[in-house]
Amino acid sequence: MNNERVNLTELLKYPLTVFSILLALIVATHTLGIKFGVVSELSVEGIKFTQETKSEVSDLASKLNAALTAIEELKARTPSAQTPIVQAAIAEAAQTVSDQSAQFSRISPGSRQGYIFIGNYDNAWSALKLGALETGQPIVIAPGNLKAGTTYQVLGNMVVRDGLPANDSQYYQGRASLGTVPRGSKVRLISTPVGIHREFATQYWAQIEIP
């Protein structure tokens, strides 16, 4: 009981902060259509949400990132069918989110397993998202030599999907987001990455866990 009174007293010291946060959530809910789910904790440190909400935010952020990339690419070229370079850029953008979104939708270590995009490979890596654990430098190892149980750093704020995307028209859009792994986080490979041969690139996905 004493602890509850102390927590309440501390919280009441910051009425404007709490009100501002709640007001922002209400505006986001009604104007942007974001569903924030269940609030799991309210304290002087802020508001914490359930894992379901983290998934919603990371999914929305990744779609927005892909849309912005597509718009920029369209503005930079004359009307024509999407080139492989444009398609690859859009697909890559959809697997990452901003720093702010990554922190909000961050998956807790040890909580879940999932799949992340790690880069395109054709005799060499492009759009690479894995770095050496010790240095953070981009890896040069071919995807077939990336072994289960090895740990790396992620080089972007990566969206974690609930399964390996199917090689169809839906692709990554057919897999739900579980949240994000922020740039610099450690991830452990559960199995050797799988290459998906799209018309614009061979994109590799890795099943990972967060140690």
Image (tube, rainbow, N blue to C red):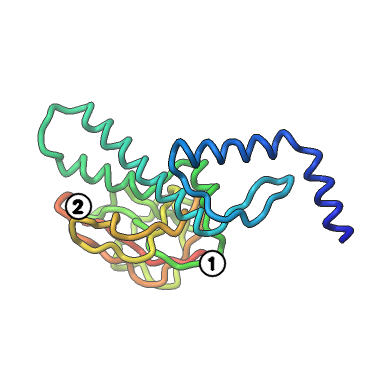
Q: Nearer the viewer, residue 191 or 95?
A: 95
Provide residue 127's location: percent of width, then percent of height: 31, 47
77 versus 98 height, above or below: above
Amino acid type of the residue that numbered disc 2 sits on in the rendered structure:
Ala
Quadrant for residue 108, please give it.
bottom right
> Which of 198/141 is in front?
198
Considering the numbered disc 1 on the image, is that residue within a helix, a strand or a loop?
loop
Q: CA distance from mark 2 to mark 1?
A: 31 Å
Q: Residue furthest left?
A: 80
Q: Does the CB distance between marks 2 and 1 fall below 8 Å?
A: no
Residue 178 horizontal/vertical position (percent): 44, 59
Q: Say which label, 2 or 1, has the lower sequence index.
A: 1
Within-10-Å neighbours for mark 2: few <14, some 14–19, many 20+: some
- Residue 181 makes an appearance in the image: yes
What residue is shown with label 1?
A: 111
Residue at 81%, 39% in the rendered image: 13
Q: Which residue is mark 2?
A: 201
The N terminus - image quarter: bottom right
Q: Position of residue 141 (x, y in %)?
A: 33, 60
**Outermost residue to the front:** 30
Q: Is 61 placed above or below 80 here? A: below
Pick the quarter of the image with the C terminus. Answer: bottom right
